[in-house]
Image (tube, rainbow, N blue to C red):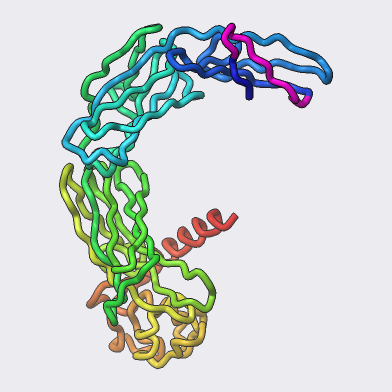
Amino acid sequence: RSELVLDGAYDAVGLPPGEVLVWAIADGYATTYHPDSDAPDVRVAVAEGDTAGIDVSMPVESLLVGRLPGAGPFESASVVVYNSDRSIGVGAIVEEDGTFVIDGLHGGSYTIGVYATGAGLVSGTVAGAGGDLAFEVPPEDTLDAGEISVGTAGVLRGTVVDRYTSAPVYGAFVHAESRSTGAVFTASVEADGAYALPGLPPGEYAPWVDYTPACDVDPDWLNRWYPDNLTDAFAAALSVAAGGEAVWDARVAPDLDGDGMDDVWEAENGLDPELDDASDDPDGDGFTNLEEYLLGTDPLSTDPRDAGCGCGTSGAPRLLPACFLLLVLAAARRRLRCSFIGM
């Protein structure tokens, strides 16, 4: 790093030998990379003991100004513009009235990214009819982009509590997967059990909640899928409208021994809620305790009349081969995802 003197000269001393990237920043001028580019595409080799003369030619800056729609609040909103190959992004904070100014630019083609979930807007790159909308900034001049066209977002909010005690499950995470794009939005659960997922583009979402204890000895709770399902094989979707609010209050089951089964269900069905007995098959019917739990059947009886509910729904018969196959496939998918996360 070096500071310019009045005649525009600079001195950068103490550099290790090798390739160097040189760029310059000055008020009123475009941020420029050697020799005269808006992007870091040229590096210069400097040998040990040598002095290299590396000049940078800086044009007067261009500006891109605009404003976001709506009434805000905009205190946490920001805008980032990207050059044509997205090698450089320049950002700015949005003012209270929704206006923004991006300075230090070269003339050229830019796309604009908006990040304003707190203002009820959809975050992401501003789109046009055929993809990302390009804004042509003139050299050494100002482009007024006017009001930026971004979508109005919706919000998913609610609570996550223990299904038996109604105690808040602080530290759980709520996820919502878009049925149209596959994008996943995530929010953490606060100490009072509340959560909010703002900035959702309008559409259908499949929400679920999960919890990961900090330590092996900490309390744990089981995953739950909307509206109240044990697995993602039978998860439903809810609709989020532009400017609207969807609500899901999730009730999760405790699992202190980490065996994937509801502790209360285990106690009510003659199992030990403090022992990991998920793979046991005490009634010898070929279904493990965990499979019996997911099917809603009695783990200590082979009598079909003892069946409760199947696949997380009520009134299903005991022998459900297709249903059970879906459960196995869903569990395999979850294990695969977890294995990638853990790599």
Q: Percent position (x, y) of residue 2? A: 63, 21
Residue 230 place in picture, x, y as percent:
34, 70
Camera-side residue: 325 or 101? 101
Residue reaching furthest to the bottom:
270
User: What residue do we see at 28% from left, 72% from top?
Assistant: 251
Residue at left 54%, top 75%? 216
Q: How many marks?
A: 0
At 48% from the left edge and 76% from the top edge, which residue is drawn? 218
Is residue 14 placed above or below 163 in the rendered structure? Answer: above
Q: Is residue 25 above or below residue 219?
A: above
Residue 35 visible, this angle: no
Q: Which residue lies at the image location 26% right of the left edge and 42% below the top edge?
A: 201
The outermost residue toward the right is 49
Q: Quadrant of residue 146?
A: top left
Does residue 134 belong to the magenta stretch? no
217 versus 283 height, above or below: above
Q: Which residues are magenta?
A: 5-16
Chief SS of the magenta region: loop
Q: Nearer the viewer, residue 218 or 24?
A: 24
Could you say which is closer to the camera, residue 242 or residue 290? Answer: 242
Q: Quadrant of residue 139?
A: top left
Q: Quadrant of the N terminus?
A: top right
Percent coordinates x, y for residue 18 in the rendering: 76, 23
**Quarter that holds the C terminus:** bottom right
Percent of width and height locating residue 331? 45, 64
User: Can the viewer see residue 333 in this picture?
Assistant: yes
Drawn side of residue 43 relative to residue 229, left or right = right
**Residue extending furthest toward the front:** 6
Q: Is residue 233 above or below residue 298?
A: above
